Image (cartoon, helix red, strand yellow):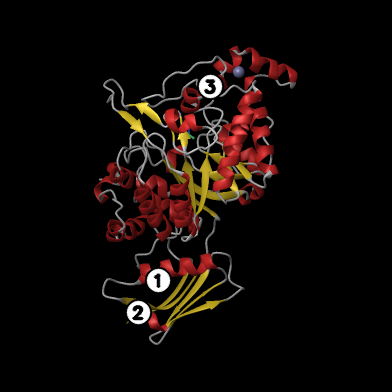
Amino acid sequence: MLPLIPYPTTMNLSGGTCRFNPDTLVFQEQSTLPHEGYHLSITPTQTVLAFADDAGRFYGEQTLQQLTSPDGTVPLGEIEDAPRFSWRGFMIDSSRHIQTVDEIKAFIAAAARYKLNVFHWHLCDDQGWRFESERYPRLNEIGAFRNGWGFGNPNPERYGGLFTKAQIRDIIAFCAARHITVVPEIDMPGHSAAVLKSYPHLSCIGDAADVPTGAGVFSSVLCAGKEETFEFCCGILEEVMDLFPGKYIHIGGDEVPKDNWDACPLCQKRIADEGLKDSEDLQGYFTARICAFLREHGKTPIGWNEVLNAGICPQDMVATKWWDRENRCDAFANSGGKIIMEETAHVYLDYDYHRTPLRQTYSYDLQPDTLTAAGKQNVLGIEAPIWTEWVETFSRMGYMCFPRLLAVAELGWCGKAPTDYPAFRQRAEAQRAALDALGVTMAPAEDWDPEDT
Ligand code: ACM
Ligand code: ZN
């Protein structure tokens, strides 16, 4: 079996090989091929790579690169290939621990090799703001830093930093060259401790707790009763839209404790004035206002599945299914809403291999039968996050993500596992040298499925 990931849809190989000669490579535009698809035809005298668009050409080139053995030979025959899902994503949390630009690029280059096409960038959270803002400079000076990190025995050193606009532009261009869309996330109204430390007047109770130095869900949420909160959120989103050219903007919405809202006179007044039921509905009101703003600017908002908890979620927003206790994403997709599959039990790459063995990631069903036939069509694809509370170094990040992200890439491209699991493990192991060459660490094979031996 050829060591390809993702495994191509259709292969018709003769069994022979030839030495690959780049001078005989012919590119052919063929509009009948699908978006992102390609056709490779390899004979001893020439290789023809046909595609309908630039992404298809890029993916054909990735396959050709993977097909080429260390001795420079390629198999003879035909490959016809196209992705099953349009959303093949990975998320990097740059808040809990920040990465360098070169580390982010190395990770992106690895993702592109496996035909992933969405980089969801988690740019802010309680533990640090990482997006350089011109309008709100206190985010850069205060929100981007915290006093160390850790439980019990925190390292007292100041920790932090951010990505400048020039660095972000550089990363967006690096992604564009690899047909990867960058989806920035500004998480609101929860996970906002770093914002509130910078601008305490945006909270319900004027609190300015320190930027936290440990993991958790905090009650530091933006006040939904104040107009200043909406001015701030829309102001930041304008800066984000000026920088990120993509159609999608992620607005978070996860894990929003309602205790401050329940106790806040302004939030309670908003609930009464708008005829809302409770603080859960108030989050729905908040989400709807932010979504309307993004829509006016031609953007499509995305939120974590909690945005569905209030009964009033805009139908044209995309929901990311991560931990959907009430299965609201199913109902949302069944009634026409778009969803992205990103469930903790299968693709949370911060969970260790004991909790989420590679086998479990590879068995993720992206179109479960809890969805109707129409609901299945509303699954945009798959995404896997690497949350970095416990991921301090880039080599640790590589260890946690690879090979599980290879399984994600293959499921996103193929729809479901194209080969049996042992064959996938072999194909994954065959990627080690290429990942090494990109500076990305892969976990040793004995760690992938700890309970199997
Ligand atoms: C999440 O893991 N809080 C989306
Ligand atoms: Zn409030």
* Displayed quadrant of residue 230: top right
For the residue labelled by badge 3, is the local secondary structure a helix, a strand or a loop? loop
State yes or no: Cβ of the residue under disc 2 lies below 8 Å from any atom of ligand 1: no
Dot label at residue 64? 1
Residue 147 visible somewhere in the drawing:
yes
- The residue nearer to you, when weighing 128 against 447, is 128
Q: Which mark is drawn over residue 445?
A: none
The quarter of the picture where residue 277 lies is top right
Q: Is residue 202 above or below residue 95?
A: above
Which residue occupies 35% across, 59% down? 423
Instruction: Decide: few, some or many residues near mark 3? Use Cα within 10 Å; few <14, some 14-19, many ≥20.
Output: some
Task: Please tell me whether mark 2 sits on a helix, a strand or a loop.
Answer: loop
Q: Earlier in the sequence, mark 2 or mark 3?
A: 2
Dot 1 crowding, Cα within 10 Å, few <14, some 14–19, many 20+: many
Please give the name of the residue rendered at 56% of the width and 42% of the height, measured from the top-left corner: 240
Q: Residue at label 3?
A: 257
Quadrant position of the C terminus in the picture: top left
Q: Which residue is mark 2?
A: 20
Residue at the (43%, 48%) spot, across then down: 167
Name the residue located 66 percent from the left edge and 49 percent from the top edge.
374
